[in-house]
Amino acid sequence: MINKPLTDPIAVIGMACWYPDARNPRQLWENILARRRQFRQLPDKRLPIADYYHPDSSEPDKTYISRAAVIDGFSFDWASRRIPYTTFQHTDIVHWLALETAIKAITDAGYSRDDLPGEHMGVIVGNSLTGEITRSNTMRLRWPYVQRAFRAAARSRNLSDNEAAKIETTLKDCYKSVFPSVNEDTLAGGLSNTIAGRICNFLNLCGGGYTVDGACSSSLIAIATAATGLTNKDLNLAIAGGVDISLDPFELVGFAKTGALTKDDMTVYDRRASGFIPGEGCGFVVLKRLDDARRDKNYIYAILHGWGISSDGGGTGITAPNATGQAKSLKRTYDRAPYGIEDLNFLEGHGTGTTIGDRIELEGIALAMKDAQVSQKKLERSCGITSLKSIIGHTKAASGAGGFIKAVMGVNRRILPPTAACRDPHPLFNTMAHSLYPILQGEQRKPMEILRAGVSAMGFGGINCHVTLESGDPPSDHLEPSMDERSMMVSRQETEIFVLTAETVDELYEKINDLIRISKGISIAELTDLAAKLGHEAYKKACIRSAVIAGQPDELTKLLEQLALMVKERSPARGKILNDPGQMVWLSNRLAKTRVGMLFPGQGSQKLNMARVLIERFQWARDRVKETDQWIEDAGGKPISRLIYPPLDRAGGPEDVEAWFHGLSQTENAQPA
């Protein structure tokens, strides 16, 4: 047993990231709270998926997934950074994304390039395989093999030497035209370790810069390694995190052959979990010893108290997870920390959404919690679990950094952040993993409360990493969202309504076709944005009106195509309305003014969580509930909000839900007189 505390506490004083639809931590935080899921059809400009897609997982050299979560809009200003253009051109984009993100992280920490303590400042980057551009560009050097294959094919087809030579020349020009020529920058620009070296070079850092490769745990291991360097006094300041831009055939086909990708929706910690959707991104944090950060009056987002790394050992396959091995990383973490695993408020899990992976992870956490020095009854539903991958997919080597940044923001803003698309929680929550519960909606705590979190990351080869942190300074204004956090946590809807209006049928038909084109490229999150945009653009006095209800981009595309067919073949007569049998598509022509009605069933009819969204979204509704609670308490009763809004995500099973409903439906609660 390692004596506590083994390490100096480490302060997180700066952060920066670029993940799908999130170019900075605040945008990422907003997406987390609103559960904005970034999955979309993989753009052809990234990978012509039609060349590689096949629904049959056994089809050679094919993948059965066509969706991903991608970053967009990134460009590196090589001129302003004084990088030679030829160096920029011959270097993988992961280098520039990592450099730009690292610069933003030190800026967020309050430093400039000129005032960094370079002598004892290091950079540790989590990365695997560099990036997809490197793998693509090396194909230029495979021309001799392609040449031999062509010549063999030409001979087998009895082509004349002259004809074959002409075709070969054209083929060579076409083949090499898309790849940059090899020069003195190509090798360094295609290596993984030089990602860290480039950051050190640009910022003039001399404390050491290198890459660690722990597969999908790489970036969290990088953070743990940096913390060790700070504790050992080898470093005084560190940039740590990870970057991953790898959505190419090597990974997409490779993951398909392991069965890790989902053919359906990505559902983390859910009974239906069947695999993940891949993603990409970059995240870095700036770390400093807590005493030094206090001395220098740095703002402290969070305090890193412990970290642990383990391997699964033997007994299972190289890609198979192991609960005992994973539990070791958690136990080693809390052996270092000044508190135990039983003191966690939430855990940012690895949470890939794979059938085996989620189960083994929950079992591993349960094993670690089993040794906690408190009663199991106290641990019952004591720790929430969540996963960033539920909204941005598996960003592989960059996933640990993303999860760490999410946990930092959670303890900083004093919020237990939600996970997305977990509709039917894994049965292990009711058995072995009874100490855990999935955070389905999120929970806001008091601004000065101290929250504690754990973060896990596991990788191929049986490598596991876990860290733990707690709240630092008061909540950061830089992370404060554009709207109330409590409202954002209920902004996610399973479906959206898309309205289109026009003066003529032909005008509507044109709008529908434009929308079909747009729907094929948007993410799930952008469905909300599109619905809002169409709602604002709708003209209430328009003659022709239509509406579609959809919850997925591909579903929207199909329903819009159905609506287009309806417009062409069944255009409604004046004053009439048409709808499809599934009640998901409507089309009307010059309807009379209609009114919205609300039906109250009476007879004490009650439902748990009724009107929850209304109350969480609007302050006036919260005020009414608060007033009602006070009125009932003054009369000697129980606050009605506790009866209507029990913590459903912490239910131990159907019997708990039934008991809560029974309490609500009692006459003194359902029909007070």
Image: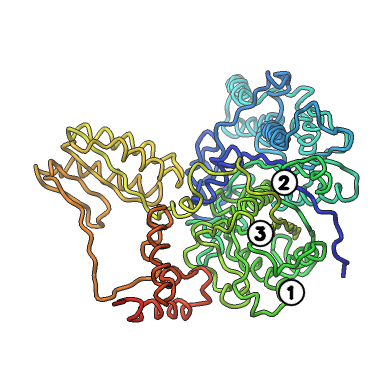
Judge left or right: residue 317 versus residue 662.
right
Which image quarter is the N terminus in? Answer: bottom right
- Taking the spot 28% from the left edge, 77% from the top edge, the residue there is 673
- Taking the spot 45% from the left edge, 47% from the top edge, the residue there is 524
Looking at the rendered structure, the kind of residue marked 3 is: Leu
Name above or below for residue 439 compared with residue 219: below
Q: Tell which circle, 2 or 1, labels the residue nearer the N-terminal end.
A: 2
Q: Position of residue 88 (x, y in %)?
A: 70, 24
Q: Mark 3 to mark 1: distance in Å?
A: 18 Å
Q: Which residue is mark 3?
A: 451
Looking at the rendered structure, the kind of residue marked 2 is: Ile
Q: Which residue is mark 2?
A: 300
The crowd level at tag 3 (other Cα within 10 Å; few <14, some 14-19, many 20+) is many
Q: Which residue is mark 1?
A: 372
Name above or below for residue 532 compared with residue 650: above
Q: Tell which circle, 3 or 1, labels the residue nearer the N-terminal end.
A: 1
Q: Mark 3 to mark 2: distance in Å?
A: 14 Å
The answer to which quarter of the image holds residue 201 is top right
Q: Mark 2 to mark 1: distance in Å?
A: 29 Å
Q: Is residue 511 visible?
A: yes
The crowd level at tag 1 (other Cα within 10 Å; few <14, some 14-19, many 20+) is some
Name the residue at the front extreme.
Answer: 634
The answer to which quarter of the image holds residue 455 is bottom right
Judge left or right: residue 334 versus residue 356.
right
Badge 2 marks a residue whose secondary structure is: loop
Q: Position of residue 496 (x, y in %)?
A: 35, 49
Q: How many marks?
A: 3
Give whichever of 168, 623 is nearer the camera: 623
Give whichever of 324, 544 is nearer the camera: 544
**Are the residues at dot 3 and dot 1 in contact (C-beta closer than 8 Å)?**
no
Looking at the rendered structure, the kind of residue marked 1 is: Ala
